[in-house]
Image (spheres, rainbow, N blue to C red):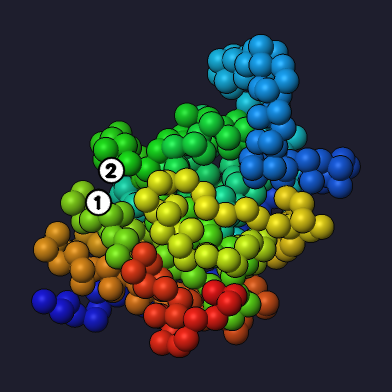
Amino acid sequence: MVLPQSFIPEPLPLSEVKEVSVPKSHGKLRPILHPIIHHIRTVIHYVPFLVAGLAARPRKTLAFMAVYYGVLQKVPGWKDFVHSITKHACSNRPRAVNCLHAGQYDPKKQYVVAVHPHGFLADFIFNLAARAAPNFKKSGEAEGLLPGLRFKLCFAPAVGWYPLYSEICGDYITDASAKTVRGVIKDGLSPMVCPGGFSEACYTGASKEFDFAYLAGRSGFIKLAIENGLDIAPLYCFGCQDMYDAPAERRHSRSVWSQKTSLPGVWIFGKMNSAVPLSEDTCMAILEPFPASKYTVDQLDQCAMDYITYLGRCFDTYKSVVPSQADKKLLVIGRDVTPQDALGVQPHSRL
């Protein structure tokens, strides 16, 4: 059954979009702290040191980990301290724009909040949460960014253990299993998910012509929204996929492997091959909710196609909020849909 076209919202005209006032970082030590924070945040850059510590000084390393995870991460004062340092170490370049017709989400409703694209580690969520959501870890609210919404991050299980993410998000970060997401909804919160996952992360830095949405055949988040009578609130960050470069070899194979294992299949390269981003000229667009609640489960495929159509329209409407993204196109891929399939061309070494 093909639903009426009116089920797909009309994006707010670009001329009516409002810039969100995101607090600026004024820390005098930011030039020093900025690279340190990024190397801690991206995890993989210090894992070799952790492994080396476990090999050379296993007792001391395990004792340190026990103190950190068993004690420090549970102390509110520690979380506030780390959050304050992180806030002043963040770049001021990431922005946000409000594209909601009513200016805010309906505070009486819950949503499934869908983050696009994944980037390496939903990098823009980290930056904006650190700068503009000091109370999120205590209340699940990011008043200055997502007004009218209380939410919980439902990402890969490991993310809740990552240093900095755990301090900034507190108890409001968990895994993205269907059971957990249903529990979050039952608790009256809006789950924030990143549908592209680590598969989409493999396409970090893949192209200057395209952004990649790993959504073909991935409709679990849409099904959960329909089953619970919720609309989907998309967030799209322009410029996120250009923050880092990543290896091109066997990119799609690694993305499929990531989907199967829920593990990252990518290593990122920033400035001078470090974890410092190549660019932080990004802008998160807070998009009008998509009415998934108007569909039934037997209309899942239609709903998924309509959602992708809507996301594409929003992409084309707002991409110029970051000038470097103005000529890009959104390419929808998936486990069984390679970039070459989506383009209808022969394989290209950079994709």
Image-based side of 313 in relation to 67, left or right: left
Q: Which of 340 and 207 lies nearest the eye of the viewer?
A: 340
Query: Vertical placement of 115 versus 69: above or below?
Result: below
Give the residue type at disc 1: Leu
Disc number at residue 269? none
The residue carrying mark 2 is 178
Residue at image coords 44%, 84%? 343
User: x%, y% of residue 172?
Assistant: 46, 34
Look at the image and tell me whether residue 107 can be seen. Answer: no
Please rate how many residues cluster around mark 2, counting C-alpha atoms within 10 Å: few if below 14, some from 14 to 19, many from 20.
Answer: some
Residue at image coords 45%, 88%? 345
The residue carrying mark 1 is 224
Give the residue type at disc 2: Ala
Q: Quadrant of residue 184?
A: top left
| Disc 1 to disc 2, C-alpha distance | 8 Å
Secondary structure beneath dot 2 equals helix
